[in-house]
Image (spheres, helix red, strand yellow):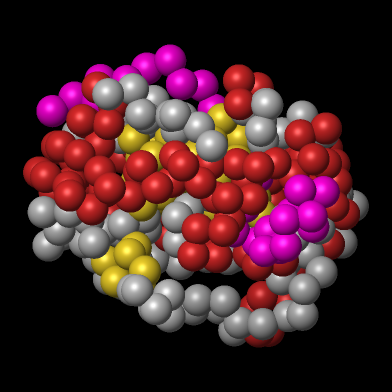
Amino acid sequence: MKWITKEGLNLPEIGLGCMSLPEDFGEAKSILNEALDKGITLFDTADLYQRGQNEVNLGKALRGKRQEVLIASKVGNQWNKEGTSWSWNPTKKYILKAVEESLKRLQTDYLDLYQLHGGTLDDPWEETLEAFHMLGIQGKIRAFGISSIRPNVIRKVMSMSPPKTVMMQYSPLDRRPEEEVFPFLEKTETKVLVRGAFAKGILIDKPEAGFLDKSKEQVRVIRDVIIKSGYMPEAVLIRFGLLQKAVGSLIIGASSIQQVRKLLEGYNQSEVVPEEFVDRLKADFPANRYQDHR
């Protein structure tokens, strides 16, 4: 099954990840307005975030500006009735129901990108992909994507119905995609949406901590090289991601107006970061590898 609406959706290099937005609408709106005013047009949310309130706040803030922006959301994690936990539900029935609720919360009649928020090899992929295919035919979504770090899942979906995008974590502290996924996807039309480009901020200004297989001391050494480079840390990390041929966009979260300004400043300065510096950073610090889901 080919994805019928994959062509024609051009995503900008930087988008705002909305997961970190405050739940209070007034606070969220001020951050979103700053992003809009500074030229950000891609906004990524999910029905899981804040039990749907994230979508509600985004929809209210973008009211009257729908034609100026691209909205991406995600589906697959179903809250229980009490709203205390969620379970994985990639069934066709659930996806077709959940999209209507997301559209209502976002105050729109279509999504530019609708992503499956996870996935395993044991999922009912034929009916899952059929649901997204139906939504494309109905005009409720412009393109379909998946959010997955699992090479085996990515290969399976690509063999059945190549998505427009694959969202996955990537930064100097998580280079697992370089081993298999990036070389595979750069030969296709599917593009990677990078999340976690700032590694939770610990490569910029957050308290130092271990990350995946890297100890606190190893993180400190990498962070020092980036901070002492003479370039804005945000610019280095954005350049690090966008230099990958398979990468189409970086989805970067912000929980304050100041963080929005920093990420835009970093993006504007990223082109001055030499490719040689990024190459040297990669050469000096070995990449981690996937241990599971190969």
Q: Is 216 situated above or below 86?
A: below
Q: Say if the magenta span includes residue 9.
A: yes
Residue 55 vs residue 254, the one in the foreground: 55
Q: Say if the magenta span includes residue 34.
A: no
Residue 189 seen from this side: no
Q: Residue 85: name its quadrant.
A: bottom left
Residue 290 vs residue 57, the one in the foreground: 57
Can you give x and y, in whole percent of width and height, for residue 101 in the image?
40, 47
Residue at 34% x, 35% y is: 144
Q: Residue 243: name its quadrant.
A: top right
Query: How would you classify the magenta stretch by its main secondary structure?
Result: loop
Residue 183 vs residue 140, the one in the foreground: 140
Q: Is 155 situated above or below 76?
A: above
Can you give x and y, in whole percent of width and height, for residue 220 in the image?
73, 77
Q: Quadrant of the C terminus?
A: bottom left
Q: Is 283 situated above or below 105?
A: below
